[in-house]
Amino acid sequence: MMRALVAGDDADGLGSALEAEGVETTYIDTPVNAEGLEAAGLADVDLFVLTDLDDATAIPVAKDLHPDVKIVVYAHDTLPEFAKGQADLAVDPNLLGPETVAEELVA
């Protein structure tokens, strides 16, 4: 079973769409730090979904803690340069709805 950790308010509903696709989804409040990621079970997830780019520093932290995790950014804002190389997928919710993104992630 695929597992995801969603950080941020998830106002656009990607977490719910992942759950509808059968993904075991855990939510973590922001701000996101190493201790919070570890406590939320980052080591056991396949996807780390970030919905609030005010916490973009969580991307390199997540990769340091779990190098194989797939980083998905689902946000309206632009991903900062320092995090672009570490994100596996960055999608603007205005371009693709959560159901479509979730379907592609589990395919």
Image (tube, rainbow, N blue to C red):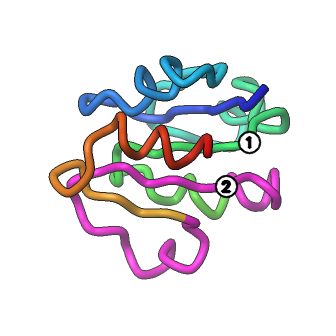
Of callouts 1 and 2, which one flags the residue occurring earlier in the amino acid sequence? 1
What's drawn in magenta, residue-wise?
62-88
Toward which corner of the image does residue 67 lie, by quadrant? bottom right
Image vertical order of residue 82 relative to residue 75, above or below: below
Q: Do the residues under discs 1 and 2 have CB atoms within 8 angstroms?
A: yes
Residue drawn at point x = 65 percent, y = 43 percent: 47
Q: Which mark is residue 7?
A: none
Q: Nearer the viewer, residue 1 or 59?
A: 1
Query: Quick check: 60 left or right of 35?
Result: left
In the rendered structure, the answer to whether residue 6 lies left or right of residue 9 reads right
Amino acid at pointer 1: Asp
The residue beneath circle 1 is 46
> Is 71 included in the stretch rendered in magenta?
yes
The x and y percentages for residue 69 are 74, 52
Q: In this view, does 41 lie above or below 76?
A: above
- Relative to 39, residue 34 above or below: below
Label placed on residue 70: 2
- Which residue: 34% across, 45% down? 52
User: Is 13 a magenta residue?
Assistant: no
Q: What element carries label 2?
A: strand
The residues bearing labels 1 and 2 have C-alpha atoms spaced at a distance of 6 Å
Which of the 4 quarters of the picture holds residue 80?
A: bottom left
